Amino acid sequence: MARKRFDDSNCSVARALNQVGDWWSLLIVLQAMYGTRRFVDFQQELGIAKNILCDRLARLVDNGVLKKVEVGEHGSRFEYRLTEKGRDLFPVVIALRQWGDKWNPAPDDAPLDLRDRATGQPVQTIQVHNADGEPITVRDVFVADAQTPGSKKDFA
């Protein structure tokens, strides 16, 4: 059975996952955040097959998450760099890392100790806040129906 495409869906999550939601794409984005730029380095760091890497890089470039920059003579060398759209995935990647550290920690290793470059302080756990800056959970929100003003649907 073919997977349904959600390019035109009203669901932002489904549309976002169409662009960056598969295993390799998010790992490529993470490596780009670590500073990886060259095809060979992505391949070495991730242990990914060339054809899969080529496909995912092309898709990330097509979707505006990465840009392909010519860095060699006669266009023979390229680097892949995060765009603003790609850099905006930073909180998503950090939230996913924090979720994974909590619910599926590495058995033999401590989680990465992420720290603020300017202060050296640990990065706080990502939370969703209400308009007053108070942390909220899935139980504290509802979906307002833009088509029917005043109506609402529980989120969880």
Image: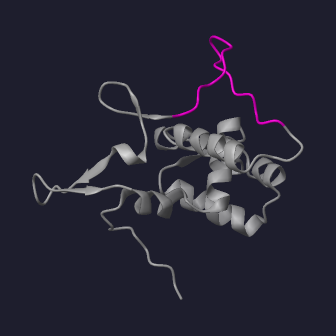
Left or right: 143 as drawn, with respect to 3: left
On whether residue 151 falls in the magenta region, the answer is no
* Rendered view: 103 above or below 134: below
What colour scheme was applied to this rendering of the protein?
Answer: one colour
Residue 72: tell me if it is visible: no
* Rendered view: 137 above or below 145: above
Residue 150: tell me if it is visible: yes
On the image, the x and y values in percent for residue 128 come to 43, 36
Quadrant showing the C terminus: bottom left
Quadrant showing the N terminus: bottom right
Q: Nearer the viewer, residue 112 or 118?
A: 112
On whether residue 120 falls in the magenta region, the answer is yes
On the image, the x and y values in percent for residue 79 come to 67, 44
Q: Which secondary structure class fits the magenta region best? A: loop
Which residue corresponds to the image point at 16% horizontal and 55% vertical from the top-left?
146
Which residue corresponds to the image point at 81% horizontal and 46% vertical from the top-left?
106
Q: Nearer the viewer, residue 100 or 81?
A: 100
Left or right: 100 as drawn, with respect to 20: right
On the image, the x and y values in percent for residue 96 come to 60, 46
Magenta part of the chain? 110-126
Which residue corresponds to the image point at 47% horizontal and 38% vertical from the top-left?
84
